[in-house]
Image: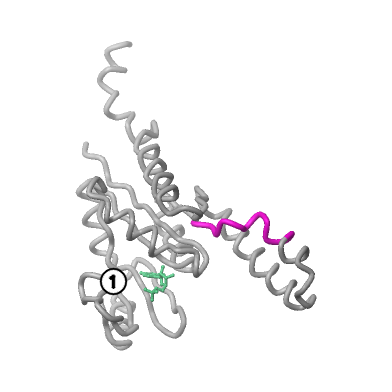
Amino acid sequence: MSERGLLIVLSGPSGVGKGTVRGAIFDDPETNFDYSISMTTRSPREGEKDGVDYYFRSREEFEDAIQAGQMLEYAEYVGNYYGTPLQYVEEKLAQGIDVFLEIEVQGALQVKERMPEGVFIFLTPPDLSELKNRIIGRGTESMEVVNERMETARKEIELMTSYDYAVVNDLVPEAVRKIKGIIETEHLKTERVVHRYQKMLEGLK
Ligand code: 5GP
């Protein structure tokens, strides 16, 4: 029996640096898993290529793909659709290849519903735990602003608990090292490897 690949989902609040961390992971020649290229309706930025950075599509094309059941997940973010094409993910996992998604939080929660066996990694800003003290301690913000920020932080922390791991994005190389460590560890889980040892275990009977 060949092992299915791992589905690795990196997500986190906006502005936390998911794209930078993902870039550093895939710049590393030792990275041996695949990146799932997302589909989006936003326009390409300078230097971005269709089929490399994203599949750039019209709203109509994107909505057709949703209707046809071709998306593993999708979300609207700042007025544009972003989503993960299902077929590529399915094919790679079936071939035993790990697939890495870098997506925003609403999409990550959808993936969790559909593929709970995935590995869900939440990238956090470095100062999350100090946020409250900092906001209150500074004493310069109105109560309204403090409350608004605390509410945002609270929602972020609540979402974190839906994930398997939380990694602080303080220094990018450190975050990359931790994420790679998580993936390596996940590959060693007994439920994934037990079949390799089945014969040996039978011999012990
Ligand atoms: P950007 O426009 O800066 O490339 O990406 C904006 C946001 O969309 C980022 O938070 C990124 O993680 C997220 N994103 C990129 N691809 C996908 C996707 O396929 N699905 C979802 N849900 N979010 C995505």
Quadrant holding the N terminus: top left
Q: Residue at x 50, y 50 (%)?
A: 167
Q: Which residue is drawn at 40% across and 83% down?
A: 80
Residue 145 figure quarter: bottom right
**Badge 1 residue CB within 8 Å of ligand 1:** no
Which quadrant holds the C terminus? top left
**Left or right: residue 148 compared with residue 22:** right
Above or below, 127 against 81 in this view is above
| 111 w.r.t. 68: above or below | above
Percent across and percent down for residue 199 are 25, 20
The kind of secondary structure element at disc 1 is: loop
Residue 129 included in the magenta stretch of the image:
yes
What number of labels is visible?
A: 1
Residue 166 point in image, percent of width and height = 52, 50
Q: Position of residue 124 (x, y in %)?
A: 53, 57
Q: Nearer the viewer, residue 159 or 15?
A: 15
| Label 1, residues with CA under 10 Å away: few <14, some 14-19, many ≥20 | some
Magenta span: 123-133
- Residue 17 point in image, percent of width and height: 45, 63
Q: Provide the residue designation for mark 1.
A: 70
Residue under the point 63% across and 65% down:
155
Is 110 displayed left or right of 199 in the figure?
right
Asked if the stretch drawn in magenta spans residue 178, the answer is no
Q: Residue furthest top?
A: 204
Q: Nearer the viewer, residue 102 or 18?
A: 18
Inspect the image, locate mark 1, and give the three-letter code of the amino acid beneath it.
Answer: Gln
Q: Which of 97 and 34 is in front in this view?
A: 34
Q: In which quarter of the image is ligand 1?
A: bottom left
**Which coloring applies here?**
one colour
Name the residue at 45% across, 61% down.
11
- In the rendered view, would you say 51 is above or below 30? below
